[in-house]
Amino acid sequence: MNEIARQPKLLKDYAPPPYLIEEVELDFMLAPRAARVASKLRIRPNPKVATGGRPLVLDGEGLALESVALDGKALTPSDYELKEGSLTIPRAPAHPFTLELVTYCDPETNTALSGLYLSRGTYCTQCEPEGFRRITFFLDRPDVLAVYTVRIEAEREVAPILLSNGNPVAHGDIPGTGRHFAVWHDPFPKPSYLFALVGGRLAKVPDRFVTVSGREVDLAIYVEPGKEDRCAWAMESLKRAMRWDEERFGREYDLDVFNIVAVSDFNMGAMENKGLNIFNDKLVLARPDTASDADYASIEGVIAHEYFHNWSGDRVTCRDWFQLCLKEGLTVFRDQEFTGDTRSAPVERIAAVRMLKTHQFPEDAGPLAHAVRPASYIEINNFYTATVYEKGAEVCRMLQTLLGREGFRKGLDLYFERHDGEAVTVEDFVEAMADVSGRDLSQFMLWYTQSGTPELACSLDYDPHAKTARLSVSQVVPPTPGQTKKEPMLIPLKMGLIGANGDELPLKLDGKGVVNDGLLEITGREQVFEFRDIPSPPTPSLLRGFSAPVRLTVSLDPEQIEFLMRHDKDAFNRWQAAQTYATNLLTAASREGGDLSRVTGKEALRLAQALGQTAGDSSLEAAYRAEFLKLPSESDIARELARNVDTDAVRAARESLRRTIAGEIGSSLAELYEAIAPQGPYSPDPESTGVRALRGAALDLLVATGKPSALARAERHYREATNMTDAISALAILSHLDAPARDEALAHFYARWQDEPLVLDKWFAVQARAARSDSVETVRALLSHPKFSLKNPNRVRALIGSFVHGNPTGFNRADGAGFELLAEQAYEIDRFNPHVAARLLGAFESWRILEPVRQGRAKAVLEALARRQLSTDSYEIVTKTLGPS
Ligand code: BES
Ligand code: ZN
């Protein structure tokens, strides 16, 4: 392995490029084994850098170089240096010049799916973050922005559709050859990572959008022929996202066309290439019988996300990859706001916080912890993390909370106006926010530079004589790898005080008037707030709407938490109270080997009653009620335990609580289940989706009673399902059981869907996630199933990904069999697709919270893996996960 590739890159070493590339002409001749790429680059020395004949070093990987010419004059090998990874022209001119290159790359053997590759016969590209260098030699860095003109030529039979970024300018046949061409021009300067090309035999689903200022945009979704009937939802979502971005953020689309292409082999979810988004087909294709409500929701969210990048990412991009949160955190924040406005704001907030706590909190607490803007990385592909994305979105949300919606909007407007067409930094973004608000945001910058989840401890003391309530707040940011000393952060703490009758009390701060919007700003390590005119002991509701990505501890007794779960007017905190109540029981029981009866008598029953009451409250949205019926997950419990985790005990505790709750409120759940049975054809609208979620959650709990009537109901739910949502929720419920009904349903599902890859992925995933003691063996057997392939990332994620990320008890099995399975499969995948392998290996990140036996097994497996030949990607994950020895 190349040791240079393993040297960390540092933010502080950033230097502007010595040369700029301002115009690019690319000419592609598509062929499976040798795609010819002729490029013509208009280059000039960067005026901001004292160049003086500095060498021009172009990035390039896996390319065959045919020719180089400078200002029309062919160069000979003695005029340049060619090594793996770069092409250097030592004596490049100190004036503007043209460089012409002809290279070849090999799409067919490109198994890493980065650069130009073939997916089921379709040529497509993935260039972010460093894939363009696998297409041609270039300054493959985001601060080099160029205007691209692209000509693509191919056999018409093989690739009747030829697409690239921007607007179409020409196309035609090359007579007598069976070949044809298309020319595209993108007027907006962009970095190479936003380049895209597609060539293939694809079906086009067209539509139109007229922007707020009257620009007519041709929209199209390209899919494999035969899949045209699965594009309607994606198209509808796109048009809603385009309108929403105009209305909410004043962002209008800027080209004549907007194209989306769906491909079957894709490392990620989707990619925001200017004017030509490329998607994993699972995030485009939906029909009621093939896609679940969850799929519809992710399609809507991801279509919006990639579209929103047109401004937050494409028009204003990142100076370097350390600034990734600038586009990703902001765009996740924007897509969350879109979903909140489109569906239910509280349910969307719950989903976002669940995601943050499940993925980002463990990352921040483990060996891979890094700041929202990391200071160093080895392989940038490993930094598309929950911290950059999810915590990055929270940081934007906190700015909106601190500045107010209007203030934040003004800040964003200024940011886009000031930096249109530029590659910028986090400082530029925060400066725009500071300028419009007149605020000093220097302490806020710590959210970008300090890693670790701040711990906020709060307690409330009531003085019955003075009628005051004192809120004491303290914050600690825990040490993380490479960051031992931390400064206190600026934490927006939204709160309320609730009187005995459930009313909100006005928050009158001694000497400072009434607290605006219930928002306190915590800035020090210790702070006290004294509220006056409080007639009787209040219950505090803290961190409303999850106003900051912190771990909150409040000293509340179970009665107070129960009070909040019944009365809190903040919908998020009301749900959070129920989760906290359950988590307290579950962690206590887990510490007792999973024996719930040793830690609770009446609490579990009180919880059951409160949940039953909320679930049955038809004044609340169905989707929100469904959230109450979902108990904290096994990984939620493990995270709260934080050390000495025995995953079998965790599962036992959770199952036991489910049984208790179901025993207590089973009959009302059964009634609810029957009462809300939907009528009429499937519709993916938020209301119907909520009802299906509520029914599914009720059914899931009911089956925990183990009663034959409940099993029969689950079987019927599967049999009578008229859409994928009902079918897959019933199949998931049955998959955990040791009953013939499980095998029958799985066999039925397979027989029906074996030729539909995206649906068959669900069949693999459901089995990998099943809460059964033989799940390692099940997964192992499925690895040799004729329909399994390591080469397709969706299939790998469905089986191996679902197991290692979605089945903590199976993966962390005490004998280490789960760890061995992952190490061995990731190693195989690493040889041809490092990106996918490294992502799977992320499942080891929490090995240190396990009890000693499991820890020992995980460590041994990781150490053995570290001794093998690994890609840079996997090497970084494995060695950092192991930590200093
Ligand atoms: N820019 C990314 C895609 C990407 C990620 C490219 C990593 C290269 C490496 C895209 O905008 C994105 O964030 N996609 C997400 C989905 C999104 C809704 C969070 C993805 O692909 O998972
Ligand atoms: Zn993104």
Image: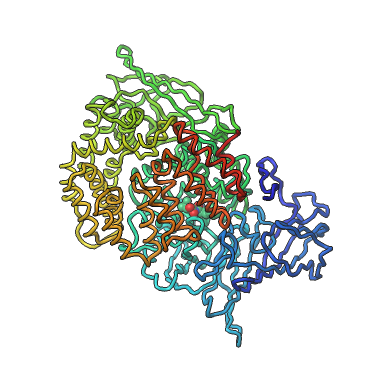
For residue 811, side relative to residue 8 (left or right): left
**Residue 681 shows in this picture:** yes
Measured along the vertical axis of the image, is residue 27 above or below residue 333?
Answer: below
Measured along the vertical axis of the image, is residue 497 above or below residue 186?
Answer: above
For residue 770, side relative to residue 156 (left or right): left
**Residue 165 shows in this picture:** no
Q: Quadrant of residue 81?
A: bottom right
Task: Spot the residue most to the bottom.
Answer: 176
Number of numbered discs visible in the structure rendering? 0
Residue drawn 15% across and 42% down? 667
Q: Position of residue 290 (x, y in %)?
A: 34, 62
In depth, the one of 811 and 66 nearer the eye is 811
For residue 405, side relative to residue 871 (left or right): left
Q: Position of residue 34 (x, y in %)?
A: 64, 71
Q: Position of residue 42 (x, y in %)?
A: 72, 64
- Which quarter of the image is occupied by the C terminus? top right
Measured along the vertical axis of the image, is residue 620 above or below residue 509?
Answer: below
In depth, the one of 756 and 697 nearer the eye is 756
The figure's colour scheme reads rainbow
Q: Position of residue 259 (x, y in %)?
A: 49, 66
In depth, the one of 436 and 686 nearer the eye is 686
Residue drawn 66% across and 42% down? 10
